[in-house]
Amino acid sequence: MTEPPKRSPFAADGIAAPLRHAVFRRIWLASLLSNLGLMIQSVGAAWAMTQMTSAADKVALVQTALMLPIMLISMPAGAIADMYDRRVVSLVSLVIALAGAISLTALTWAGAITPNILLAFCFIIGSGMALFGPAWQASVSEQVPPETLPSAVALNGISYNIARSFGPAIGGIVVAAAGAVAAFAANAMCYVPLLVVLFLWRRISEPSRLPRERLNRAIISGVRYIANSPSIRVVLARTLVTGIAGGSVSALMPLVARDLLHGGAQTYGIMLGAFGMGAVIGALNIGEMRKRMHGEAAIRLCAIVMGIAIVAVATSQMAIITAAALVVAGAVWMLAVALFNIGVQLSAPRWVAGRSLAAFQAAIAGGIAVGSWGWGHLADSIGVEGALIVSGITMAASPLLGLWITMPPIGGRDEDADLLADPEVQLSLTGRSGPIVVEIEYRVDVDNARPFHNLMQEVQLSRQRNGAYGWSIARDIADPELWIERYHCPTWLDYLRQRNRATQSERALHQRAMAFHLGPDPVRIHRMLERPFGSVRWKEETPDRATGEVLPVSTPAGSST
């Protein structure tokens, strides 16, 4: 009996498949170096804070200062990533982080660093990375084909965690040998290769035929998409809870090294390295996890195992046992976060990918930031060991949320549908003309009333997440077969965007709704320009100046709304 041939990691669905693509490979290698620098800087900042103060909450605030910007500005950052060239956005954000790193190095060299100044510059560096994250992650789908996207997401996680495996240990050695200033300088230098690679990337952008949204409207559109996407809402809620419960590990690690293991900067670096090494192991097994377990079962297993590992860290007095527990905790942490990330990336269409990933980043970073603050204060009250035990129990109990909000299965990417031609109109419209009211008339057999109404609830979410407002479905009381779907968009330009944002599955959903229509006449679609008091400009926008009548435009059956 012959053994089956071993699968190559470079196979189409192998973990290393994205590295066959030159652009992704170059950016990935450069990002690995920048992540290494960031880890070295984090060790320097955390240890510098422990040297300036013994307060646990101040030490934990270093992690909060690095993560809080991601929670605060991630949605504007995601909107910017969707509106502008993602390569340019990435370059600008890296320059911000580089400027913060250089300034922090100079102030530390001059001996002018204080706890508050350290936190302020950690916040600036975190702000640059918060702006960088959505643009970088959303551009991954432009660097690799769709079938390798899950592997590319996993590789980006591996990049961060390879750095996390070796960076803290290197950082501990650097800090022990040359002080925190050397760690800050190393971080600044490690940004340069990624800046060069992104500058040389000749990104092929597909300009939209419609003008870009204003920033405030783009943020609102992103929030509405997420609010009307049940699967993404569930993933974000579970991500936030996981971040809060697991934030104790990164926040209290300096105190674990100093107070529980009675070590120094090098011990701290080794412990963080153990966690990062576990994360690499977890990332390498994401594909296997996705094959064997899906959705809720995988997240439940990861949370329970991590909870046990955190309790082991709290109760251990030996570095070897603590390191082993951190390897396990890192592996299941990476598996959970990567599954959350893949779920969001595969659920969001291209037009809102940056904003959806920004929301994911806000959820995980916000959870870690809030958790770090909370676990730091709890450690001041009941000690580091007690805070970690409470954190472990909370993490192990978090799968109970699955009784109310169950993780959706993670499938393939829902591809964008083909663009539709603009509808023919008889009025002179500008992009700002509006509101535009859309009414769709269906004739549905009385026996199919309930199935049709149930399906229209899914249509409602589809319309609303793509930009429709005031959606309703009504049934004619004098003609029970007649149903009218109604919604509006603020302007004509908003309506053109809304009708072209649907994915292939959403278009199929709309066609299923139209399939309920019966009779020889097609589904009738009316698009009307609503006239609020004081908004009328008859001379420019209507051919009939005598009557001022605004006529609806009818569209034949089979055309999308």
Image (cartoon, rainbow, N blue to C red):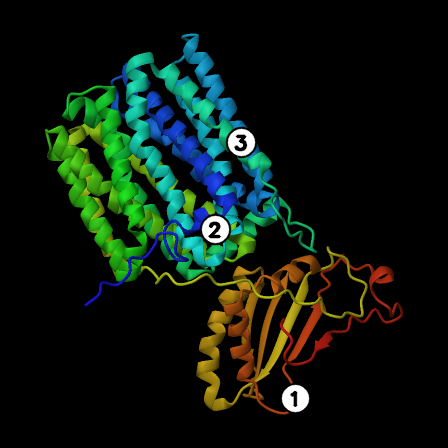
Q: How crowded is mark 2: few (under 14 residues within 10 Å), some or many (20 or more)?
A: many
Instruction: Kindly report which numbered mark, 3 or 1, lies closer to the viewer in this rendering.
Output: 3
Is residue 254 something that shows in the picture? no
Q: What residue type is labelled 1?
A: Asp
Q: Residues within 10 Å of mark 1 (few under 14, many from 20)?
A: few
The foreground one among 258 and 119 is 258
Residue 372 position within the rendered picture, expressed as x and y whole percent measured from the top left: 30, 34
> Mark 1 = which residue?
521
Q: Which mark is residue 356?
A: 2
Q: Is mark 2 on a helix, strand or loop?
A: helix
Q: Is residue 307 above or below residue 369?
A: below
Q: What residue type is labelled 3?
A: Leu
Q: Residue furthest right?
A: 546
Q: Which is nearer the N-term, disc 1 or disc 2?
A: 2
Q: Is residue 132 left or right of residue 108?
A: right
Q: Residue 31's image quarter?
A: top left
The foreground one among 236 and 312 is 312
Q: Compute the Cα span from label 2 to label 3.
A: 25 Å
Q: Residue at x 48, y 81 (%)?
A: 452
Instruction: Kindly report which numbered mark, 1 or 2, lies closer to the viewer in this rendering.
Output: 2
Q: Which is nearer the N-term, disc 2 or disc 3?
A: 3
Q: Which residue is drawn at 51% across and 44% down?
A: 22
Q: In which quarter of the image is the N terminus?
A: bottom left
Q: Residue 216's image quarter?
A: top right
Q: Which is nearer the N-term, disc 3 or disc 1?
A: 3
Residue 427 position within the rendered picture, expressed as x and y whole percent measured from the top left: 80, 67
Q: Compute the Cα span from label 1 to label 2.
A: 40 Å
The foreground one among 226 and 20 is 20
Residue 239 position within the rendered picture, expressed as x and y whole percent measured from the top left: 34, 48
> Mark 3 = which residue?
195
Q: Residue at x 69, y 80 (%)?
A: 556
Q: What residue type is labelled 2?
A: Ser
